[in-house]
Image: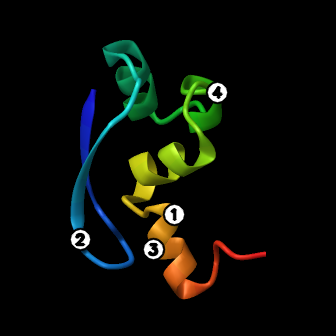
Amino acid sequence: MEIKRKSILTGVIRVRDLPITEAQLAKYHEGTTPIQYIMPNLSTDDREFFMTGITPEEWAVIGEGEE
């Protein structure tokens, strides 16, 4: 499913194709279950994008993606 998000860090709008279902999306919007339980098939990076619009590249620019 194509998901469009605006990054809360940069304001850049991006679209990504994420492997989620309408049922998962509906459950997320209920707001009662953590995303990692609703969408365990998504990577951590994909869940971050879904929730905040932030990409791994943006985290790397601000230094949060480096160990």
Earlier residue among tags 4 and 1: 4
Q: Distance between the residues labelled 3 and 1?
A: 5 Å
Q: Where is residue 4 in the image (x, y as percent from the top left)?
A: 22, 47
Instruction: Kindly indicate whether the residue at mark 2 contacts the one at mark 1 (C-beta within 8 angstroms).
Output: no
On the image, which quarter does residue 60 sit in? bottom right
Amino acid of disc 2: Val
Q: How crowded is mark 1: few (under 14 residues within 10 Å), some or many (20 or more)?
A: some
Earlier residue among tags 3 and 4: 4
Q: Distance between the residues labelled 3 and 2?
A: 10 Å
- Seen at 79% across and 75% down, the residue is 67
Amino acid of disc 3: Glu
Q: Where is residue 16 in the image (x, y as percent from the top left)?
A: 30, 43
Q: In screen coordinates, is 11 left or right of 18?
A: left
Q: Name the residue under label 1.
A: 56
Instruction: Kindly indicate whether the residue at mark 1 contacts the one at mark 3 (C-beta within 8 angstroms).
Output: yes
Q: Name the residue under label 4.
A: 37
Residue 25 vs 66, above or below: the answer is above
